């Protein structure tokens, strides 16, 4: 596609439920990044992938968060047993190579009731 | 704790006025980027500065990177309503971008 796409665009869930957020990077981009944007705060780095590998998972807020990438393309961010503090906009970005310009998707707005 | 501090947090000005947004840190970055984000969309890259003291101009926008590569400023001349948005600075170190909290700019017609 022309740009990074994310789905769903909005997600409302109940506390305790699991959610999956999907990111389709720009075709040919080898690096993929997940960020979280909370109201009034900057983007918080969560995890990055180089190919299908995630060398640094230290940004994930807790063990309820996990992410995977398959085929060097689509990535899924999973949040288990969601909590109200997980409510935020989850942004995905991709770049041709690591340390190159990151292009962001429109984000998934997650609301945990 | 925010690695990058942006000021002011909010800025509302009249069309035609000038504005400056600041981005400060105690850390040194290999590069510094400015993004603009509009409601419901992801951030869009405006510029990347990599050399201490570097000044880049993008039409009415002027970006400056501090000599020590710890701070940056964004100056908009003769602001227009289309400049309205959330301006984010981000410092690059290896693969990771650290973002400031952003400055919400509103330009009134």
Image (cartoon, coloured by chain):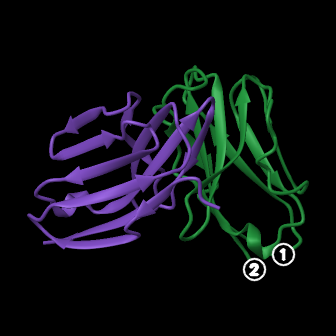
In the image shown, does B2 or A41 lie closer to the viewer?
Answer: B2
Number of marks: 2
Residue, x 64% and y 27% (percent of image)? A31
Label 1 near label 2: C-beta < 8 Å? Answer: yes
Which circle's residue, 2 or 1, is located before the other in the chain?
Answer: 1
Q: Is residue A98 left or right of residue B19?
A: right
Taking the image as shown, residue A63 lies to the left or right of residue A34, namely right
CA gap, disc 2 and disc 1? 6 Å
Colour in which chain B is drawn: purple
**Residue pointed to by mark 2:** A113
Say the numbered circle drawn on residue A48. none
- Does residue A17 appear to the left or right of B14 in the view shown? right
Residue in the image at 65% along x and 65% along y: A88
User: Residue placed at 24% from the left, 58% from the top?
Assistant: B83
Q: Nearer the viewer, residue A90 or B107?
A: B107
**Residue A87, picture quadrant:** bottom right
Q: Dot 1 corresponds to which residue?
A: A15
Is the residue marked by circle 1 packed among few (<14), some (14-19), or many (20+) residues within 10 Å? Answer: some
Quarter of the picture containing the C terminus of chain A is: bottom right
Q: Confirm whether residue B1 shows in the render.
A: yes
Chain of residue at mark 2:
A
Tell me the SS state at disc 2: loop
Q: Colour of chain A?
A: green
Q: Is residue A111 above or below residue A97?
A: below
Mark 1 element type: loop
Horizontal and vertical percent position of residue B104: 37, 67
In the rendered image, residue B19, in percent from the top left (x then y), is placed at 21, 61
Q: Quadrant of residue B32?
A: top left
């Amino acid at each position: 596609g022309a740009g990074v796409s994310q789905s769903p665009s909005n997600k409302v869930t109940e506390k305790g439920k699991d959610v999956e957020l999907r990111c389709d990077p720009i075709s040919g981009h080898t690096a993929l990044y997940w960020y979280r944007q909370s109201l009034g705060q900057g983007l918080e780095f969560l995890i990055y992938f180089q190919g299908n590998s995630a060398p640094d998972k230290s940004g994930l807020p807790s063990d309820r968060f996990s992410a995977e990438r398959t085929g060097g393309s689509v990535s899924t961010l999973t949040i288990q047993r969601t909590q109200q503090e997980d409510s935020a906009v989850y942004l995905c970005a991709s770049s041709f190579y690591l340390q190159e310009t990151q292009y962001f998707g429109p984000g998934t707005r997650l609301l945990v009731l | 704790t925010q690695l990058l501090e942006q000021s002011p947090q909010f800025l509302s000005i009249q069309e035609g006025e000038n504005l400056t947004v600041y981005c400060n840190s105690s850390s040194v970055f290999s590069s510094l980027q400015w993004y603009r984000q509009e409601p419901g969309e992801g951030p869009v890259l405006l510029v990347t500065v990599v050399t201490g003291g570097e000044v880049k101009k993008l039409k009415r926008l002027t970006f400056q990177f501090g000599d020590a590569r710890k701070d940056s400023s964004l100056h908009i001349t003769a602001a227009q309503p289309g400049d309205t948005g959330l301006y984010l600075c981000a410092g690059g170190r290896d693969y990771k971008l650290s973002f400031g909290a952003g400055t919400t700019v509103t330009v009134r017609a």
